[in-house]
Amino acid sequence: MASRTDSKLVQALVGAGVLMLGVALAAGAISIPAAAGYGGVGPNFLPWVVAVVLAACGVLMVREALTGGFRELEEPSGAATGWWPGLVWVSAGMLANAALITTIGFILSCALCYLLAVQGMRRASGQAAPSAPRTLLVDAATGLLIAAPVFWTFTQFLAINLPGLTNTGWI
């Protein structure tokens, strides 16, 4: 078990990391043009909001860590170390998504990513590997039910091109 001082140092370092992330995002937002659009705000508005909020959260986290540490912090649950096979499943899902998105389209590649990630999470939480094809079908259907509305929202309503399986824009 780490000492209280070590814990406070780690907490302060996490807060400093969040603060640095906010500063880095602000540095990137400087290069985005500020010309106001339809709503009176430019394309740099949201990056600046996120940068300011991240920096404020980082400052508050550092302050909290230096004035006694995160209070009423519960002991972490789970194993002391990560479960590497679960990481492999989730990584395989993400890599398959990246490799196949232009070949089989956004919906199917994201559904596959979801299916593989859920398998990794199930195994990491100690659940037995699904022996029934029904579980795999439910996971695949759930992935489709999540990915399809996202695809349609982006392509049909926001006019953002995502790779589809066909040229119709609906799948």
Image (spheres, grey):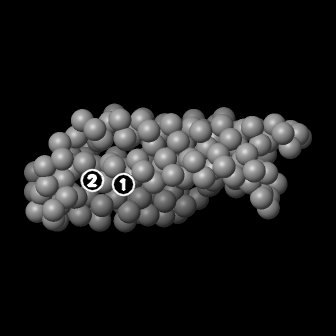
Disc 2 marks a residue whose amino acid type is Phe
- In the image shown, does 81 or 35 lie closer to the viewer? 35
Task: Classify 10 Å Cα crowding around label 1: few (below 14), some (14-19), many (20 and above).
Answer: some
Task: Classify 10 Å Cα crowding around label 2: few (below 14), some (14-19), many (20 and above).
Answer: some
- In the image shown, does 63 or 96 lie closer to the viewer? 63
47 on left or right of 4? left
Asked if the residues shown at circle 1 and circle 2 are in contact, with their CB atoms under 8 angstroms apart, the answer is yes
Q: Position of residue 83 (x, y in %)?
A: 70, 39
Q: Mark 1 points at which residue?
A: 49
Q: Mark 2 points at which residue?
A: 45
| On screen, residue 161 above or below 39 | above
* Residue drawn at x 35%, y 35% as measured from the top left: 27
60 on left or right of 32? right
Q: Where is residue 131 in the image (x, y as percent from the top left)?
A: 62, 55
Q: Position of residue 113 (x, y in %)?
A: 43, 47
Q: In which quarter of the image is residue 154?
A: bottom left
Disc 1 marks a residue whose amino acid type is Val
| On screen, residue 10 above or below 52 | above
| Image quarter in which the N terminus is found | top right
| Image quarter in which the C terminus is found | bottom left
